[in-house]
Image (tube, rainbow, N blue to C red):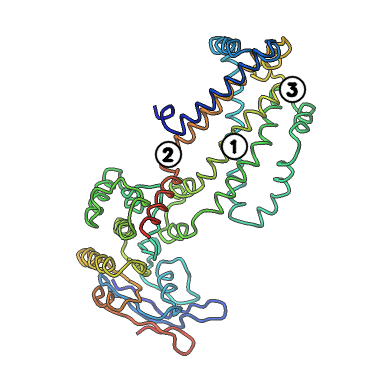
Amino acid sequence: MTVFTSRAGKTYWTSVLVILVIWESVSRGVDQEIIIPSIFSVSKELLRILSGSSSWNVIFWTFARIIFTFFLDLFLALIIGIPAGINSKFEQAVRPLESAVRTVPTMGVILLSLIWLDSELTPIFVTSLIVFPILYRSVVDGIRNIDKKLVDFHKVHQIHFRKQLKYFYIPSMFPFLKTGTINSLGLGFKVMITAEVLSQPERAIGTIFQIERAQLNTAAVIAWCVFMIAVSSLFEYLIQRFARLKGYDTTEKRNEAVQTAAGKK
Amino acid sequence: MNLEIKNLTMTYPGITVFKNLDFSFDEGKITCLLGPSGCGKTTLLNLLAGTVKPDSGSITPDTTGKVAFLFQESRLLPWMTVLGNVTYLMDRHMNEKEKKDMGNDLIRRVGLEGFEKSYPSELSGGMERRVSLARALGKNASLFLMDEPFSSLDDSLKDRMTELMKELFSRDKKTVIHITHDTRIAGELADRIVYMERKNGRTVIR
């Protein structure tokens, strides 16, 4: 288990331990569970969440919304980002829309969508507006950074476009898409739950957050936060693993090659 | 069937590269193109590869898509293993086993046995060139175009690559057109040496 025994792993887990010690110390100092609950109370709530079937029902629906929104935005980002990456005039034409979507205040969008849409669609619409510009920019930058010499290689050898897409364009864009995916999912989780808290869909983690807050169950609110942090980290880990498994993550290999070349000199 | 260029004219804005050019490349032979920089050697290869269209004239038979091109750099896909790169240009109608068997055979022929699962970044410059050569051979093309593929290698590596190419291409009777600035390599490799030069505002071949 290198995550526990490696140097970086040890530093990471020491840092986690320090945070837990500070948390428990502050909790004991304040001595009011309603303001800063103890680690024990939060752990108890976390166990309650994980063992209750109704919790998994809301978790499922929130995740379904996040996954649906992510793939919808990824699809739109590819449809608009690929031509924008290739053609700078098209990119200029899309830029005002991108700037508007990127800079619009999240709360403003939530309030407007509460007026325009029903409570089920509001979180999807709001998250979509936040996630899209990140993925779109990843696709545009990914296309711009594709090795032009490899593009010529494919042109000369008349390789079928579907094959080029699978073995050349997507792997070329992958480092950018990976960063975009990690950033957009991280932000997507936060925005989705914020929008759910305000729009109150029938089955949603955000709705449960609001209920727990109304009942002044601070330990449960923190337990849900801990759960979301764990899930978000798990997603990030899975994306990194996928990149390595497919051989798309060439950063390490490039670094090794640079070091080897430097050694040769 | 020889590769025939007939009455070919090719211009770029402000410059005529070829004007009414007639030339023939022998089938199954290695032809080396020599000539100063800027005389149109790479343009000629691009015309033969079909990536650049002439203003007029013809090249027969049509070689578009039937060409294997070796560039100055190896141009390997960094996220693919040696075997993945070597099988990349193979006929898409071949099944995976056929591709793998042929790929392993080509890797053995270029002397890289044992490196099938290595990535390009784990190889030396010479090994990368051998992978790109194996990849080109895997395409089973009728015409091999080479734009100074070994120009950045040191002399001993150039000699080894030249020897390897000669062995592989002569055995399979491939039509090869090879640009080089190195007369020594041209002498060792070529069945025919052709000189290109600029004369009276256009490029001539002799």
Q: The numbered mark 1 sits on a residue in which chain?
A: A
Above or below, B44 against A29 in this view is below
Residue picked out by circle 1:
A183
Q: The numbered mark 2 sits on a residue in which chain?
A: A
Q: Earlier in the sequence, mark 2 or mark 1?
A: 1
Name the secondary structure under disc 1: helix
Kind of residue at badge 1: Asn
Kind of residue at badge 3: Leu
Residue picked out by circle 3:
A198
Left or right: B101 in relation to A129: left
Q: Which quarter of the rendered picture does the C terminus of chain A lie within?
A: bottom left
Tell me the crowding category of disc 1: few under 14, some 14 to 19, or many 20 or more residues within 10 angstroms, Cα based.
some
Question: In percent of the image, x 43 and y 69: which residue is there?
Answer: B46
Name the residue nearer the viewer: A244 or A221.
Answer: A221
Residue picked out by circle 2:
A244
Kind of residue at badge 2: Arg
Tell me the crowding category of disc 3: few under 14, some 14 to 19, or many 20 or more residues within 10 angstroms, Cα based.
some
Left or right: B167 in relation to A31: left
Above or below, A45 against A19 in this view is above
Q: Nearer the viewer, mark 3 or mark 2?
A: 2
Question: In percent of the image, x 55 and y 49: which residue is there?
Answer: A142
Q: Position of residue A79 (x, y in %)?
A: 59, 45
Q: Position of residue A143 (x, y in %)?
A: 55, 51
Q: Position of residue B88 (x, y in %)?
A: 36, 51
- In which image quadrant can residue B40 be found? bottom left
Tell me the crowding category of disc 2: few under 14, some 14 to 19, or many 20 or more residues within 10 angstroms, Cα based.
some
Q: CA distance from mark 3 to mark 1?
A: 23 Å
Q: CA distance from mark 2 to mark 1?
A: 18 Å
Left or right: B104 in relation to A173: left
Name the secondary structure under disc 3: helix
Question: In percent of the image, x 35 and y 82: which residue is there?
Answer: B195
